Image (cartoon, rainbow, N blue to C red):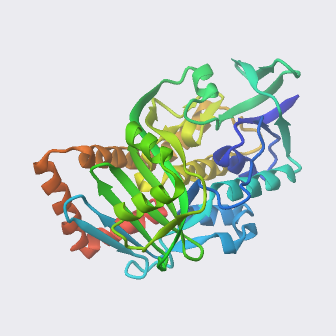
């Protein structure tokens, strides 16, 4: 079977590449063995979708089909240091309608999946995992143990931080485990969050509470493996009380409404996200600490940039040409680099127990809060990817 693009990985980044190519001349294969699973209740894994990413999802026909009753806007954000430092962000003060939208992972994934399944230019290769990849001068061949090989002019690696495509293509990656986990769970709260997100830099990790519709919040507690394991071992009532105490009681009593889960945290940067006939998107191209909430937004903007570059090509141009792919790489060079090293630096800065560093980092939060021009510039970069 011959295609223009073979996308390996049908998660949010990979599926959004396929969705962004709807109506184009490209024949696309999407290789993903596992279709999305949507939780019966509230999904413990949520994403803070930036306005820029929401605009992209609207362009490809996804956003407008999501259940608005399951989405919460973030109008304000309060950041607290470990020694009294504070920083406040407001959409209104920055001239924006909202800072972000909190959306369940499974619901975005399902809508993307259903959209891609309806596309006439996409062939879904489900239930199979490739076991060989051969990069030739004019094509890439993917081999399978249970089906005939497929050929394409470009392979898109969207298969996560442990990317098989990246490894097979020989693209070097620097992977640094944080020796931390992100513990996630949802809670019903006593007091109204008023669409405010909270983040605390604590001695035992970084705790974030993100607004969900109604009096509910989603928690992400990034902490050392040992502390994460302790949190996961707590019963529902004790965990809710522990989180409420760590949050200083800002939302009153909490009640656990979804089982707590955890995922490992890693820093990952590649030497290049492209090679002849290979392009990486999403976590296959970069992995960042979740304290910024921007991991999925980087993936969506990768998909947007790659699709735009491909759709702009004249019919005679080869989508796997390295010159074309280097253009995509240049487009996506700045934002992932800045966010990766900013979040990496903040994690290391607030992870230090040195009292001098504690004084400096909290003074920095307070100073930034008193400089509206700087604060608003940070907000605008966070929501649009540019100052």
Is residue 168 shown above or below 182?
A: above
Q: Residue at 37% across / 62% down in the picture?
A: 199
Image spot of residue 14 (x, y percent): 68, 43
Q: Which of 310 and 178 is in front in this view?
A: 178
The total number of labels drawn is: 0
Decide if residue 1 is in sight here. Answer: yes
**Quadrant of the image for the N terminus?**
top right
Residue 77 as seen in the image, left or right of residue 130: left
Residue 135 as seen in the image, left or right of residue 147: left
Residue 61 as seen in the image, left or right of residue 82: right
Q: Residue at 35% across / 65% down in the picture?
A: 378
Residue 107 placement: quadrant: bottom right
Residue 167 placement: quadrant: top right
Is residue 53 shown above or below 275?
A: below
Q: Residue at 72% across / 47% down in the picture?
A: 15
Image spot of residue 117 (x, y percent): 85, 50
Residue 175 as seen in the image, left or right of residue 341: right
Q: Which of 48 and 264 is in front in this view?
A: 264
Decide if residue 140 is in sight here. Answer: no
Image spot of residue 182 (x, y percent): 47, 46
Image spot of residue 291 (x, y percent): 40, 53
Residue 72 placement: quadrant: bottom right
Q: Which of 151 and 79 is in front in this view?
A: 79
**Quadrant of the image for the C terminus?**
bottom left
């Amino acid at each position: 079977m011959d295609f223009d693009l073979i996308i390996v990985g049908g998660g949010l980044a990979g599926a959004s590449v396929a969705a962004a190519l709807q109506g184009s001349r490209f024949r696309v294969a999407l290789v993903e063995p596992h279709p999305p699973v949507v939780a019966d209740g509230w999904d413990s894994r949520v994403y803070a979708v930036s306005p820029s990413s929401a605009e992209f999802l609207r362009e490809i026909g996804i956003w407008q089909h999501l259940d608005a009753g399951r989405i919460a806007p973030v109008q304000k954000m309060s950041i607290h240091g470990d020694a009294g430092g504070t920083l406040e962000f407001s959409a209104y003060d920055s001239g924006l309608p909202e800072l972000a939208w909190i959306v369940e992972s499974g619901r975005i994934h399902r809508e993307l999946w259903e959209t891609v399944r309806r596309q006439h230019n996409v062939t879904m290769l489900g239930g199979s995992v490739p076991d060989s990849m051969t990069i030739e001068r004019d094509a890439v061949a993917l081999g399978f143990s249970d089906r005939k090989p497929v050929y394409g002019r470009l392979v898109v690696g969207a298969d996560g931080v442990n990317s098989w495509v990246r490894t097979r293509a020989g693209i070097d990656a620097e992977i640094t485990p944080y020796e931390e986990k992100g513990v996630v769970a949802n809670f019903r709260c006593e007091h109204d969050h008023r669409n405010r997100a909270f983040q605390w830099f604590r001695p035992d990790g970084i705790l974030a509470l993100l607004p969900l519709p109604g009096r509910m919040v989603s928690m992400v507690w990034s902490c050392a493996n040992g502390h994460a394991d302790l949190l996961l071992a707590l019963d529902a009532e004790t965990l809710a009380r522990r989180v409420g105490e760590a949050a200083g009681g800002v939302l009153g009593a909490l009640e656990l409404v979804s089982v707590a889960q955890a995922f490992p945290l890693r820093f990952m940067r590649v030497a290049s996200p492209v090679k002849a006939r290979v392009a990486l998107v999403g976590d296959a191209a970069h992995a960042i600490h979740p304290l910024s909430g921007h991991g999925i937004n980087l993936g969506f903007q990768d998909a947007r940039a790659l699709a735009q570059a491909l759709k702009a090509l004249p019919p005679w141009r080869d989508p796997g040409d390295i010159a074309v792919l280097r253009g995509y790489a240049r487009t996506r060079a700045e934002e992932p680099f800045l966010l990766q090293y900013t979040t990496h630096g903040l994690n290391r800065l607030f992870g230090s127990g040195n009292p001098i560093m504690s004084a400096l980092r909290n003074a920095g939060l307070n100073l930034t809060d008193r400089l509206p021009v700087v604060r608003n510039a940070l907000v605008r970069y966070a929501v649009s990817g540019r100052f």
